[in-house]
């Protein structure tokens, strides 16, 4: 047996031992008569990036809100497993859930204004997460803030500027830094590139790919942009009318779509 | 100092007995949970909201015929608000009023703690404009209550971080947030941070009333009160280069007073009672010395070094 095979087998074992970091079973969210999302089942493994695509109103964001603990599903169970002890997201007390929300997972909003404090400097925005977990040393918080600014490619001399003086792309990158600074295991992103022009989008996507890979973060990315899905995600879920209609490896779903809706979706993309 | 006859057209202490009981219940709860904001049914008072309606209601609920009341506004006993509130209680409760800190059993204050150390048995009643220390960070009341309930106080330090990032030190000089009894972050009302250390292990009972915001909170005697800070930027209080111009005190909080339109200024004790007591004891500040030299005033007292 040669070294490469050894590595391969080791890798397989690692994969076998690790339990899914997130499991959704029959997650349903109804708004009275209307359906937000219905009977969604899937598992997400550590380090994996899952994309959720679908048209507007297909329940992508509703599902993401449920998964991220922001909205209680009408029925179904969401199980998270960070350190070998699985916990039911909506069974644990709210303070514990909020604490996990600040430390173990993060949410990148489509609109950076929802995820940032606009009247607090960039450094303060990044540092808040550290102060949340009890860091009380200004110098260390400052160093971490500067470090993260450079990691998301914002000049460090902008550390004391307010996010409202930043461009849209910079705001989005700052939001990313704020989410990633406590080193979460899981990140939810709701249209992270929405509202940005293509060149800025490309830069953000590049950054996202590098960060997610370097930090080994599991991520769920909601998008309606198939190019984003192809670039970033390992697996893809296609949603329509609140249901998952197709689910598989990203290239498989995009290159060989089975469901009629997915075929429509992939053929609707203009080739540049 | 002065004993007035009570105005019998009003119930003793102005408020009706049911309201007093309601406020006393809120006070008991507040004392039982140091630093926790207890909602209460704030009443209309013959005073504009924001002028001390919270403090005045607490005083009204506490005061008895044998109490002696002192009221200070920014440390001074002789400002409009202080004089009016003192006169109000002299009229509706017939109580003795005083300007001397040691004589008072209840001290209602706006934005200062007297320099004279308070003793057991004394009650300090603060008038509070904004009871919520997290308000500047979080505008939602639902959210701030959750943050208090679960001790999620990381955001509080963001305010201090911003100060240091911008000014190189914590520039917040009043309303400086404190942690009470290792549990609740509390706004000490707009007292200067100079007074924060006095709250720690104070033998007197401290009560806080916010009339407009309908909240009461308290610090029982001998309770730990710690001003928030960073490990590498410890809490510190204001310092002045010169002593009080009138009494020469170097240990009191000084107000800067502009004396002319050519940049003239003087620093005097904000606690007028403390300053007067010191002057009566013979302490003399630089300006008094100067005035004596100019023969503007007669020197009757012996100057002490």
Image: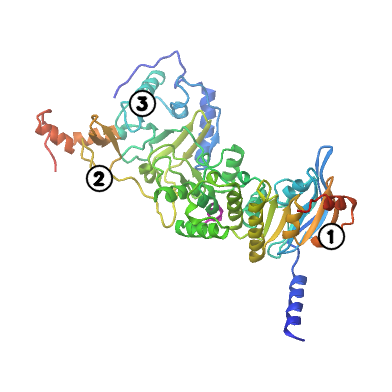
Q: In this view, does A247 lie above or below B42?
A: below
Circles 1 and 2, Cβ within 8 Å, touching? The answer is no
Judged by its main secondary structure, the magenta piece is helix
Q: Quadrant of the C terminus of chain B?
A: top left
The x, y position of residue B3, in whole percent, is 32, 20
What colouring does the structure picture have?
rainbow
Is residue A204 toward the left or the right of residue B135 in the image? right
> Where on the picture, by quarter, is residue A48?
bottom right
Tell me the number on the disc at residue A157. none
Chain ID of residue with mark 2: B
The secondary structure type at the circle numbered 1 is: helix
Task: Please check whether the numbered discs 1 and 3 fall on a single chain.
Answer: no
Give the magenta-colored segment's residue range.
A128-134
The x, y position of residue B69, in whole percent, is 36, 28
Q: Distance between the residues labelled 1 and 3?
A: 80 Å
Task: Please check whether the numbered discs 2 and 3 fall on a single chain.
Answer: yes
Whether residue A247 appears in this view of the structure is yes
In the picture as drawn, the residue positioned furthest to the top comes out as B9
Residue B229 lies in magenta, yes or no? no
Q: How far apart are marks 1 and 2 (CA)?
A: 77 Å
Q: Earlier in the sequence, mark 2 or mark 3?
A: 3
What residue is pinned by disc 1?
A255
Q: Which of B26 and B164 is in front in this view?
A: B164
Front tag of 1 and 2: 1
What residue is pinned by disc 2?
B241
Front tag of 1 and 3: 1
What residue is pinned by disc 3?
B82
| CA neighbours of label 1 inside 10 A, class few (<14), some (14 to 19), many (20+) | few
């Amino acid at each position: 047996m040669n070294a490469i095979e050894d590595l391969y087998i080791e890798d397989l074992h690692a994969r076998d031992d690790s339990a899914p970091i997130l499991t959704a079973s029959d997650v349903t969210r109804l708004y009275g008569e209307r359906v937000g999302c219905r009977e969604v089942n899937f598992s997400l493994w550590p380090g994996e990036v899952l994309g959720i695509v679908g048209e507007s109103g297909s329940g992508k964001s509703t599902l993401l809100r449920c998964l991220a603990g922001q909205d209680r599903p009408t029925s179904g169970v969401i199980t998270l497993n960070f350190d070998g002890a699985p916990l039911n997201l909506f069974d644990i007390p709210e303070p514990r859930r909020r604490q996990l929300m600040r430390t173990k997972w993060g949410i990148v909003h489509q609109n950076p204004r929802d995820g940032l404090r606009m009247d607090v400097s960039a450094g303060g925005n990044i540092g808040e997460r550290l102060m949340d977990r009890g860091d009380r040393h200004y110098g260390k918080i400052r160093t971490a803030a500067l470090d993260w600014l450079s990691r998301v490619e914002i000049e460090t001399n902008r550390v004391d500027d307010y996010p409202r003086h930043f461009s849209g792309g910079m705001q989005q990158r700052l939001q990313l830094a704020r989410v990633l600074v406590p080193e979460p295991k899981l990140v939810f992103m709701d249209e992270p590139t929405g509202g940005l022009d293509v060149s800025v989008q490309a830069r953000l996507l590049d950054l996202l790919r590098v960060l997610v890979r370097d930090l080994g973060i599991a991520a769920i990315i909601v998008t309606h942009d198939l190019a984003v899905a192809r670039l970033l995600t390992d697996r893809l879920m296609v949603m329509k009318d609140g249901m998952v209609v197709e689910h598989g490896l990203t290239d498989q779903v995009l290159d060989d779509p089975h469901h009629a809706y997915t075929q429509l979706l992939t053929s609707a993309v203009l080739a540049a | 100092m002065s004993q007035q006859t009570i105005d019998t057209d009003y119930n003793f202490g102005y408020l009706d007995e049911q309201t007093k009981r309601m406020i006393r219940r809120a006070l008991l709860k507040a004392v039982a949970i140091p630093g926790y904001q207890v909602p209460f049914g704030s009443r209309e008072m013959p005073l504009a909201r924001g002028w001390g309606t919270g403090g005045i209601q607490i005083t009204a609920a506490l005061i008895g015929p044998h109490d002696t009341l002192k009221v200070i506004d920014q440390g001074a006993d002789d400002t409009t608000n202080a004089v009016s509130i003192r006169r109000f209680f002299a009229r509706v409760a017939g109580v003795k009023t005083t300007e001397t800190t040691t004589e008072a059993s209840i001290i209602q204050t706006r934005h200062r703690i007297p320099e004279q150390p308070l003793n057991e048995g004394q009650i300090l009643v603060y008038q509070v404009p904004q009871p919520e220390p997290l308000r500047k960070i979080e505008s939602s009341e639902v959210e701030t209550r959750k943050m208090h309930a679960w001790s999620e106080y990381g955001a509080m330090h963001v305010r201090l971080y911003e100060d240091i990032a911008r000014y190189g030190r914590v520039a917040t000089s009043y309303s400086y947030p404190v942690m009470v009894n290792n549990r609740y972050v509390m706004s000490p009302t707009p007292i200067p941070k100079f007074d924060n250390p006095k709250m720690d292990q104070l033998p007197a009972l401290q009560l806080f009333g916010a009339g407009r915001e309908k909240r009461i909170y308290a610090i029982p005697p001998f309770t730990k009160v710690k001003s928030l800070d960073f490990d590498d930027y410890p809490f510190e209080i204001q310092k002045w280069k010169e002593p009080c111009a009138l009494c020469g005190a170097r240990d009191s909080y000084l107000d800067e007073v502009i004396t002319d339109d050519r940049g003239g200024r003087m620093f005097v004790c904000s606690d007028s009672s403390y300053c007067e007591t010191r002057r009566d004891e013979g302490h003399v500040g630089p300006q008094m010395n100067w005035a004596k030299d100019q023969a503007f005033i007669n020197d009757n007292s012996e100057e002490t070094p």
